[in-house]
Image: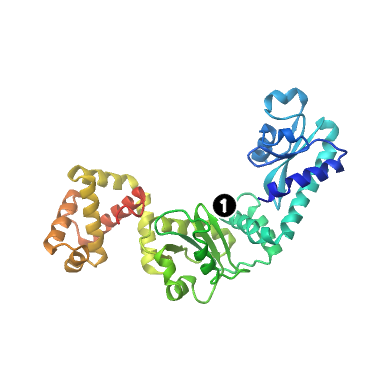
């Protein structure tokens, strides 16, 4: 990480600038990672953790040391790079006497890290892009402005309408290197380095895609179908600007968590219908839990899942008994018997075909959310 890689050198340089005073660099968890007192490296500093959490300087008087485990008297300032707190820099001494030096140290350290970040090609292509992506996906105060600043510095220009895509392994296992390096390299062929962003967030690859004449989903289907044998990728609807990226990300992750296909694109009607169904299911979970309990009073959990899978196949085949029975390798009478039992248990027998399918599909979606998308496969 940027902080750890530069902290030791920064401590050495800044200590000389302030007359050999004790200087510490702490990470965002409050642990000292570099110090002019080497024996303190790896120890916890309560004042640093408070500086990270509040985003404000924490001045510790000698009389207050009992309230700050691991600390000495002095000034502890949040260390920011483009508005993001990446750690804390601390200076030993009476706060009233060293306040001006502490402020100079804070400014110098921030500029030091910022210049190193801008100058390092390795950080530009990895850490900085990941930081931009994180700022856009999980906005906090000033994070969008920080992201815009870093994008300008890296020559990145996102062109609306923007689409967010989430790629994961079809097995549900987390993405990892070097096992997935081949996929990442293949996908990079389809990205525009100065117009798209990518990074691994929560074990999934996240893409922020600028507008393109041919949607990426279409190109991958046509030119890289082998990716869909091992991975699944879900695309949000097109959104207008940077402020919409968190909503687009929520759409894409919801699809990745629940949609049944290897390729899911909100610009396509089947995916849009599934997403709307998913939204309805999540908004009325009490009703669906009641239906589920009602079915489990009539069937064992294993039989209940079998009947749900039968219903899904039947509806996916446009209510064709023969096609659904053939797909499930069962007799047509068996399929009809299963459907009749499920509808009776759910008190749906006297309702219209549309109402029956709508409620059962909601229950399927609820079960998928409850147990994961592999539960009914």
Residue 352: x %, y % from top left: 20, 60
Furthest toward the left, the residue is 333
Counting every numbered tag in the picture gives 1
Q: Is residue 347 above or below residue 40?
A: below
Residue at left 77%, top 27%?
61
Viewer-proximal residue among 112 and 346: 112
Residue 137: x %, y % from top left: 56, 55
Residue 93 lies left or right of residue 368; in this view the side is right
Residue 275: x %, y % from top left: 39, 60
Viewer-proximal residue among 329 and 236: 329
Q: Is residue 299 above or below residue 351?
A: above
Dividing the picture into quarters, in which one does residue 49 lie?
top right
Residue picked out by circle 1:
138
The answer to whether residue 336 is visible is yes
Mark 1 is surrounded, within 10 Å at the Cα level, by few (under 14), some (14 to 19) or many (20 or more) other residues, namely few
Viewer-proximal residue among 178 and 364: 178
From the image, which quarter does the C terminus lie in?
bottom left
Furthest toward the right, the residue is 19
The answer to whether residue 267 is visible is no
Residue at left 22%, top 58%?
310
Viewer-proximal residue among 76 and 267: 76
Residue at left 40%, top 69%?
268
Q: Secondary structure at mark 1?
A: loop
Residue 303 lies left or right of residue 18; in this view the side is left
Q: Is residue 115 above or below residue 76?
A: below
């Amino acid at each position: 990480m940027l902080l750890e890689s530069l902290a030791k050198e920064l401590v050495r340089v800044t200590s000389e600038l302030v007359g050999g005073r004790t200087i510490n660099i702490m990470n965002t968890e409050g642990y000292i990672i570099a110090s002019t007192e080497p024996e303190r490296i790896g120890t916890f500093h309560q004042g640093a953790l408070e500086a990270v959490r509040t985003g404000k300087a924490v001045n510790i008087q000698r009389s207050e040391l009992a309230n700050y485990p691991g600390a000495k008297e002095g000034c502890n300032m949040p260390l920011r790079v483009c508005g993001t707190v990446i750690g804390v820099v601390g200076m030993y001494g009476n706060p009233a006497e060293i306040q001006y030096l502490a402020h100079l140290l804070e400014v110098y350290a921030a500029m030091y890290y910022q210049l190193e970040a801008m100058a390092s090609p390795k950080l530009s292509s990895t850490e900085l892009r990941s930081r931009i992506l994180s700022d856009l996906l999980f906005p906090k105060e000033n994070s969008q402005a920080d992201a815009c600043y870093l994008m300008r510095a890296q020559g990145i220009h996102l062109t609306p309408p923007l689409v967010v895509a989430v790629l994961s392994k079809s097995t549900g296992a987390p993405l990892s290197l070097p096992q997935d390096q081949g996929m990442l390299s293949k996908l990079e062929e389809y990205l525009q380095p100065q117009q798209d962003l990518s990074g691994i967030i929560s074990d999934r690859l996240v893409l922020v895609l600028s507008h393109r004449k041919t949607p990426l989903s279409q190109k991958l289907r046509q030119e890289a179908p082998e990716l869909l044998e091992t991975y699944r990728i879900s695309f949000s609807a097109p959104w207008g600007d940077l402020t919409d990226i968190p909503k687009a990300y929520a759409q894409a992750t919801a699809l990745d968590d629940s949609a049944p296909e290897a390729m899911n694109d909100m610009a396509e009607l089947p995916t849009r219908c599934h997403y709307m169904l998913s939204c309805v299911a999540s908004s009325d979970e009490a009703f669906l839990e009641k239906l589920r309990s009602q079915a489990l009073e009539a069937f064992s959990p294993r039989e209940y899942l079998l009947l749900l899978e039968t219903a899904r196949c039947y509806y996916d085949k446009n209510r064709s008994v023969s096609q659904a029975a053939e797909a499930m390798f069962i007799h047509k009478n068996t399929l009809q018997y299963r459907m009749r039992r499920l509808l009776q248990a759910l008190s749906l027998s006297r309702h219209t075909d549309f109402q029956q399918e709508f409620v059962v599909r909601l229950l399927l979606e609820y079960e998928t959310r409850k147990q994961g998308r592999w539960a009914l496969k």
